[in-house]
Image (spheres, grey):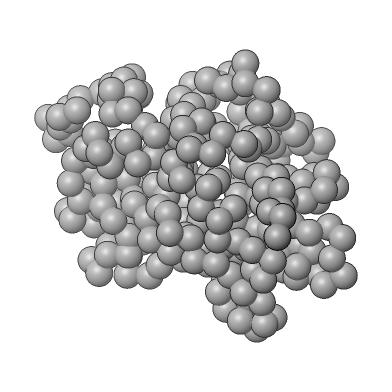
Amino acid sequence: MAMRDPLPFTFGIALVPRALTQNWALIEALLDLTLTSVRAQTDPDFRVIIACHDRPRTVMDDDPRLSVLVADWPVRETGPHNDDSGRKKHALNDYVLEQGGGLLMLVDADDWIDRETVAAARACIGLGEVGGLITAGMILDIQSLRIAALPHPDIFPGEFHRLCGTSTVACLRPDSADPVRRDPFSTLRSHHQWLEVAQERDVRLARLPISANYLINTSENHSDLHGPHLAWRRTLTAAVNAQGRCLGDAQAACFGIDTTLVSSTWRRFFPPSPDRVITA
């Protein structure tokens, strides 16, 4: 039996408008770490689309796999539910559908992904699945560089996709008559609801045997600044620092990241202080 061609794979990134940031240089630096992680894929057959109001300078500016989808609506102050990001994610989804579909992973502009992400998604998401989930991952406080595995009973006991948006891969099939199979992103809604809605709609999701790394305490993260659970976010950060350990070379390498690059970014934006120690 002839092998089918691999599905096109798209990483979609929704970027905050420059006017709503406190430090655009930090936004670009964190995005560069994310794109460094993306570029380290063992399967290099993918593309990256950044939905944005302002085109950032990135480490992938000369890479033909990177393109920009310019937001055509005015910048407005964000609310607790980050409406601008949600609108950009829907724009990315619609754009990929219009271009023929395939696998779409939405990646937050400061998170890191497993080097096997593209390969694992292509291997695990078949004709019977509408997408896949990352159920176990890591969480990193970028200011202390302490990292911990999730789920964790003393940090966050739920599966990784319950907390981090960089945890789902949708398989878009624009020719399907079934609305769930055509556009699972719009049907399954927010990442933390995917399992339950998939069960309600009687469709299958693959559990992807890979990780991802959720960055917190960036000083620009929407959930830390505007979200409806600010007190809980402070508790989460404290728990990561209490239960986690210093980011090591092997952990970073799983995401295609060199700790010297992380250290350089860290020293530039979060300079050392008596209560903040770095060993990398």
Residue at the farthest front position: 1
Q: Residue at x 34, y 23 (%)?
A: 261
Task: Residue 103: give x, y in percent of width and height.
Answer: 67, 51
Q: Tell me if residue 194 comes above or below residue 149 in the rendering.
A: below
Task: Residue 20: give x, y in percent of width and height.
Answer: 59, 34
Quarter of the image that includes the C terminus = top left
Quadrant in the rendering for residue 136: bottom left
Quarter of the image that includes the N terminus = bottom right
Quadrant in the rendering for residue 265: top left
Is residue 5 in view?
A: yes
Q: Tell me if residue 214 comes above or below residue 267 in the rendering.
A: below
Label count reads: 0
Q: Tell me if residue 211 comes above or below residue 268 in the rendering.
A: below
Is residue 225 in view?
A: no
Q: Would residue 85 be found to the left or right of residue 43 on screen?
A: right
The answer to which of 270 and 164 lies nearer the viewer is 164
Residue at the farthest left position: 274
Q: Would residue 221 be found to the left or right of residue 266 on screen?
A: right
The answer to which of 39 and 49 lies nearer the viewer is 39
Quadrant in the rendering for residue 157: bottom left
Task: Residue 86: give x, y in percent of width and height.
Answer: 67, 52
Q: Residue at x 34, y 50 (%)?
A: 139
Q: Would residue 102 be found to the left or right of residue 98 on screen?
A: left
